[in-house]
Image: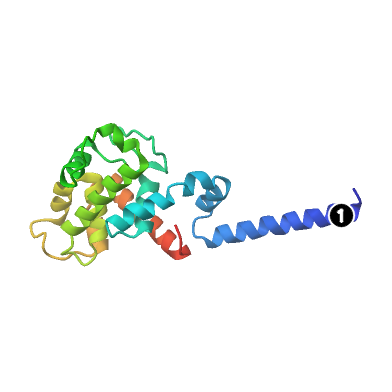
Amino acid sequence: MPRFLFRLILCLLLALGAGFVYLAARSGDPLYTFYEWISPARFQRYDKLIRTAAAQQHLDPMLLKALVWRESRFDAEKFGTHGERGLMQVSEKAANEWARENRVENFVVEDLFDPLINLQAGGWYLRRALEHWQMQSDPLPFALAEYNAGASRVQRWLGANEATPLSRKEFLRRIDFPATRKYVESILARYDFYKRRGRM
């Protein structure tokens, strides 16, 4: 290969690499963006189903995807330590409530490994939690905390007067489960990341 051609190819590869690094850095999460580039099937394969389930529950699909990212890292076969299943790590109890309220016939808990069913059940549960905390000026952190730790713990963190609006910052400060606080903060950050770049 002529030396000139070799240098040209090398310069093009370096420019291409620099462009990828620049775009990844601008995304707000270079590591996630890098993984997304090398494995788009894993990070984007459920986007259509996420949009469908989000529309059914009148949720932002970017929020639903942020929750899926945190719960399972897009692993539809994930089985949690307390029996949670699938993309949104839905518990058997929550899934049975969803199936009963939505009149889903012949539902069995193993159906939660079906990505669409899991997203529908998890989306329904998140929508219900958002409605439960709608008296708060920003119900999202309360709903996410409920999704992770249960409504009774969120009520305990709120204190005696749960109807009094509490800021996001103050509510996060009151969460005395470090894992739940980190869980809520990570989903809020991932949701902001998707919104900043304008796509899931």
At 34% from the left edge and 44% from the top edge, which residue is drawn? Answer: 116
Lateral position of residue 75 relative to residue 104, left or right: right
Residue 185 seen by the camera: no
Looking at the image, which residue is at 10% across and 63% down? 163
* Residue 127 lies in quadrant: bottom left
Whether residue 69 is situated above or below residue 8 in the rendered picture: above
Amino acid under disc 1: Leu
For this orientation, the residue located farthest to the right is 2
Residue situated in front as seen by the camera: 119 or 13: 119
Q: Is residue 167 left or right of residue 189?
A: left
| Mark 1 closeness class: few <14, some 14–19, many ≥20 residues within 10 Å | few
Seen at 84% across and 55% down, the residue is 7
Quarter of the image with the C terminus is bottom left
- Determine whether 12 is above or below 183 in the image: below
Check the image and name the residue furthest to the left: 160
Question: Circle 1 sits on which residue?
Answer: 5
Where is residue 66? Give x, y as percent: 38, 53
Q: Is residue 25 visible?
A: yes
Residue toward you, 50 or 188: 50
Measured from the top left, where is residue 111 in percent x and y? 30, 35
Q: Left or right: where does residue 166 sit relative to residue 160?
A: right
Determine which quarter of the picture holds residue 26: bottom right
Q: What is the tally of numbered marks visible in this picture?
A: 1
Q: Please tell me which residue lies in front, 113 or 69.
A: 113
Q: Position of residue 43 (x, y in %)?
A: 48, 47
Vertically, is 70 above or below 78? below
Q: Secondary structure at mark 1?
A: helix
Colouring method of the image: rainbow
